[in-house]
Amino acid sequence: MASTTKEVDVAVIGAGGVGACFLKQLAYLAKSRPSSRIRLCYFAIIDRALCHDDYSDIDIDNALSLLDSDGFDPPQIPDVIKYLSAAPGKVIVVDNTASGLMAASYPEFLKNGISTITPNKKAFSGSYQLCAGGSFVYHETSVGAGMPIISTLNELIETGDQVTLIEGVFSGTMSFLFNSFSPPEGQGGKWSIEVKKAKELGYTEPDPRDDLNGLDVARKITILARLAGLPIESPSAFPVQNLIPKELQTAISSKEFLQKLPDFDHILEKEREEASKVNKVVRFVGKVDIISGEAKVGLKWFEKSHPIANLQGSDNIINFYTKRYGNLPLTIRGAGAGGEVTAMGVTGDLLKILRQI
Amino acid sequence: MASTTKEVDVAVIGAGGVGACFLKQLAYLAKSRPSSRIRLCYFAIIDRALCHDDYSDIDIDNALSLLDSDGFDPPQIPDVIKYLSAAPGKVIVVDNTASGLMAASYPEFLKNGISTITPNKKAFSGSYQLCAGGSFVYHETSVGAGMPIISTLNELIETGDQVTLIEGVFSGTMSFLFNSFSPPEGQGGKWSIEVKKAKELGYTEPDPRDDLNGLDVARKITILARLAGLPIESPSAFPVQNLIPKELQTAISSKEFLQKLPDFDHILEKEREEASKVNKVVRFVGKVDIISGEAKVGLKWFEKSHPIANLQGSDNIINFYTKRYGNLPLTIRGAGAGGEVTAMGVTGDLLKILRQI
């Protein structure tokens, strides 16, 4: 009855917000799954790397301090691939960076039988296959962090349902901003003040313009649209509303941007006022109509009773409209950002691969 | 690079609402997955069965009419197990019945290396292991039909999150009844009329008392609580509010029940009125607090802006409160009943097993 223990060598790149949380979850997994022998065989951040020539375990609990004490300059990626290809177990690379260089290497990893997991949506161009010659690539966390968005979409499609429309709030930052700025009840504050508040609370990227340009949402829509079979070439191949005022889309600093933003508050405040006149609220949504082939990212008005109007905090919400689900969508809602929940999605992907190798 | 084709022999029991839809999806799957060679090797309903001594395929597209023309009296379950155990491929039994006899046989199936999938919540006592000696048992559809409820809960737990509370509307019938009877806006109708309407529209069991007794929700709460690690013995081990008036919990016919129900409308209408006085609506929810160990099924009042107050149609909603997700839950909402979506969950389970065998 006993099945053989699976030997798995995990390489982890990155130890930022998600990466640090993932390490803790990996330590938990290594202890809680007797059916797999999970080893951390390679660990690297941008300027340090750690591994042993004999592939002996790196102590996961102390990986960060070991990196400090025993780490060396990171090898070039071809050398990393060479090292990993010769590992005794099945190899899984977990890339918790936002590095384009790493992302460009995924095909090489896969070709060499190395499975890859990443939350990196910037990198994920969608041209990878889920499974290539015994290796796998999973990126659940590239949309909606730890929520089961991509796995759900894949299952809808694989079982033969027809996904007709996907619509939702895909950015925790945009959710937080508009839930405060245009609440279903009461009065929202000034736009520039909401942006400042969101930045202070850590809900935005270091430069809030990286959220306000809509590109993050456009990337997520691109990923979902492609999975649903729509050949969208890139996040710039469809209309994406940029909430940075045209006059501030210049080479000014983030600080200067925030100083000048109040001069443009009237734009969004006018939009809010017009929506309010017809008893609606303003939200920043991404939408892809799989039937007509149209994708769009930008502001949209919603009835105050609509689920998208009633989000809280920085929650994401994703609605899947499908033939089988009919008029009412399958909806998934919850935290779409944060180290712990994103790391959980990465760990979930690791579990999925562990079951298959 | 080419991996070997997986040979899979599927036995399907039942061809009711879910079963008939599942057959169509199985036919789709058999055609769309070149990596697996999926054969229907056994097909049975309560009084007919079909299989070939040489395990040659049953034509899935015509299985129902073949059952009619070529079927025979169903063999006893031990004989079915004997037949399936000798099949050339990996064997998966899909039990789309609500038969207790079938359910009692799952351990025997598993012992013989036969994986089992079922939407049968009545049968599912929760004492099975997910994986036993190379065979698997999946029952995603026993809660929330095709929605990813059980897989999500399992992933939360397996990755080391702490689920603290699960609360939701788990019955499509109860959802439909209370969304109409106690709407957030406007006035609901008479209780007995809502029940009649729900029955006429096919939203209730043939005898609506099988919904109103709360047992269906209690079974689902039991399944989720156990998966979350709470040793609940049975659906009758915790308080379950029965909406059948005491005086009608007797051996009367379903027709007589519906005739007498209007005499008891004042009970729920009083509850609705009291909730309304504090600006709330009434919903029938299931709840399990994993920390305190308390489970409960029954009426509860919700603020009109609460997601549970704003369901539509017969939608289910399930909120997972966890340590990692913090104050705001991970929420999944959508159709929790219906042949197509339930069959989709069964097919999804089949896909999960296909990936692992």
Image (tube, coloured by chain):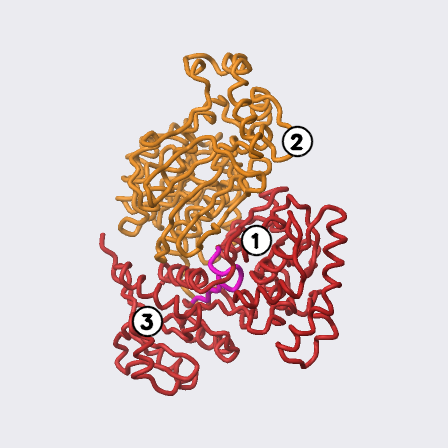
Chain colours: A red, B orange
Instruction: Determine whether A271 is above or below A11 in the image.
Output: above
Q: What residue sits 50% from the left and 62% below the top?
A: A337
Report the chain holding disc 1: A
Callout 1 environment at 10 Å: few (<14), some (14 to 19), or many (20+)?
many
Which range is magenta? A136-147
Query: Which circle's residue, 3 or 1, is located before the other in the chain?
Result: 3
**Magenta stretch: includes residue A145:** yes
Which residue position holds label 3? A9
Structural distance between the alpha carbons of marks 2 and 3: 60 Å
Q: Is residue B115 visible?
A: no
Q: Quadrant of residue B128?
A: top left
Callout 2 environment at 10 Å: few (<14), some (14 to 19), or many (20+)?
few
Report the chain holding disc 2: B
Which residue position holds label 1? A317
Q: What residue sits 47% from the left and 27% below the top?
A: B211
Instruction: Determine whether B186 is above or below A56 in the image.
Output: above
